[in-house]
Amino acid sequence: MTRECAPPAQGTGALLSGSVLAEAAVVFAVVLSIHASVLDRYSWCAVALAVQAFYVQYKWDRLLQQGSAVFQFRMSANSGLLPASMVMPLLGLVMKERCQAAGNPYFERFGIVVATTGMAVALFSSVLALGITRPVPTNTCVILGLAGGVIIYIMKHSLSVGEVIEVLEVLLIFVYLNMILLYLLPRCFTPGEALLVLGGISFLLNQLIKRSLTVVEGQGDPVDFFLLVVVVGMVLMGIFFSTLFVFMDSGTWASSIFFHLMTGVLGLGVVLPWLHRLIRRNPLLWLLQFLFQTETRIYLLAYWSLLATFACLVVLYQNAKRSSSESKKHQAPTIARKYFHFIVVATYVPGIIFDRPLLYVAATLCLAVFILLEYVRYFRIKPLGHTLRSLLSLFLDERDSGPLILTHIYLLLGMSLPIWLVPRPCTQKGSLGGARALVPYAGVLAVGVGDTMASIFGSTMGEIHWPGTKKTFEGTMTSIFAQIISVALILIFDSGVDLNDSYAWILGSISMVSLLEAYTTQIDNLLLPLYLLILLMA
């Protein structure tokens, strides 16, 4: 642990500067591509936000190298403020365009709120970074002030009073979550990852509160409510137990029994009644009827159960190899870790083709299970806590420098977000034709195929390194080629995909995201699918 917390070695800043500039160039290329596609006052705000985030990122990187940041962030990466700042604004912009094309004014306004909220959270993070910088960087503050002034002026005249209040509510929740979670979970996030993850959770929590207060019978899809309640419920459960176990030892049998009892109480006494209020039906009966509604769903569930069993066997086999190894520091090789990428591809592709609503709900349930198991591992809850610590420690990498192991959760999120984020009413009437037809496959292409091929071929055959990184040219080219082949296979097996001669845009989108994978030091399982989703939706 001492090595992880040590300040960067001499020359780290120079090493990172080249990769940071290249990463910024890719992000600006994405921003300008979306700006050219949308070309309205909101897209101009996104350009202004990108410029100021680029300047502020340099200051925050310097703070991290000097160890002057308020919270303990992940040390093996730069701040990542620029790529993280642009995700929500760009997602809101393309969502607005697609819902406008589909003739859905409600979700068109929702896209504007998403974009505005993303800009507000990013501006707050920039103000926070500059507020603790000594000496205060005058030029950067001027750029932030100009960009922020333009954004606030334009957005203020584009939102209703209720929408402005909604944005401010998300910002307030974001502030409190930052103070709580970054204190409880040191070294788990970079500033950019914290902005992206906590900003998303804050928005979900605000949406759940809003819909709970204005619920109307028969309005809203139970599937959407299920995702909101499960994600927010698991996060609040984690905050509750983290606060509780500050005052008591979580590794005893008494604490473990209390954990299991309180999990049942919170699940049955809070989460299920909350969901019942939103969907106006018994949640357990609704879930059972939904899962076993058709014969196709039963076959898919059986198939997924077999894949889950195979994944567990991979974990047990790799740990058996570690037990027989002479080295106590034996770690699973890169190829072994990428087995799970192949497994999730085999999981998601049939779900996308045959039953997307089932995949939506199944991914939500899987996320809840992953988070709950991580709580059991982190708090050393008996009888599985120590076993999970031993089993999962084999698959750690440099990104798991904090007390939590999040890479498998990020993998699930990266594959699922393209399924969860696009409003289904805006995918009708042919509004997802052309490159947009590949939107549900964004996670499969970017993470399941692209990142996996880049990692395997780059680590085994790569010789030409991209300047300032450990990634190789061969790995990136293999990634692009593999994703192109995957698109061709999707065209063959999914009759609902019609690209309409948008091949140049698809190739450009895949290439930009592959270059981002080569240069970013952020969690690529989370960042890459979001950027590919944004580009394909545009």
Image (tube, grey):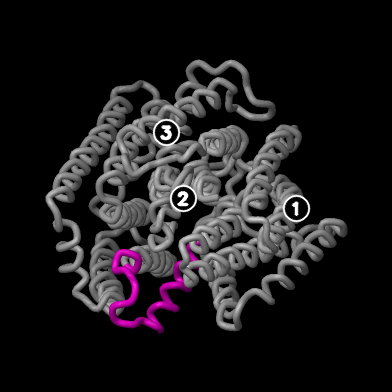
Magenta part, dominant SS: helix
Q: Residue 490 location in percent, x, y? A: 36, 35
State which quadrant residue 220 falls in. Answer: bottom left
State which quadrant residue 170 falls in. Answer: bottom right
Q: Amino acid at mark 1?
A: Val
- Mark closer to the chain start, 1 or 3: 1
Specify whether 456 is left or right of 176: left
Q: Which mark is residue 401?
A: none
Q: CA distance from mark 1 to mark 2?
A: 34 Å
Q: Residue drawn at (48%, 73%), measured in percent from left and top?
A: 206
Q: Amino acid at mark 3?
A: Val
**Do the numbered discs 1 and 3 sit on residues whose CB atoms are within 8 Å?**
no
| Frontmost residue, 248 versus 401 | 401
Label 3 Cα neighbours within 10 Å, binned few <14 / some 14-19 / many ≥20: some
Q: Which mark is residue 487?
A: 3
Q: Which mark is residue 51?
A: 1
- Mark closer to the chain start, 1 or 2: 1
Q: Which mark is residue 403?
A: 2
Specify whether 217 is left or right of 417: left
Label 1 Cα neighbours within 10 Å, binned few <14 / some 14-19 / many ≥20: some
Give the extent of the magenta segment. Answer: 200-225
Q: How many marks?
A: 3
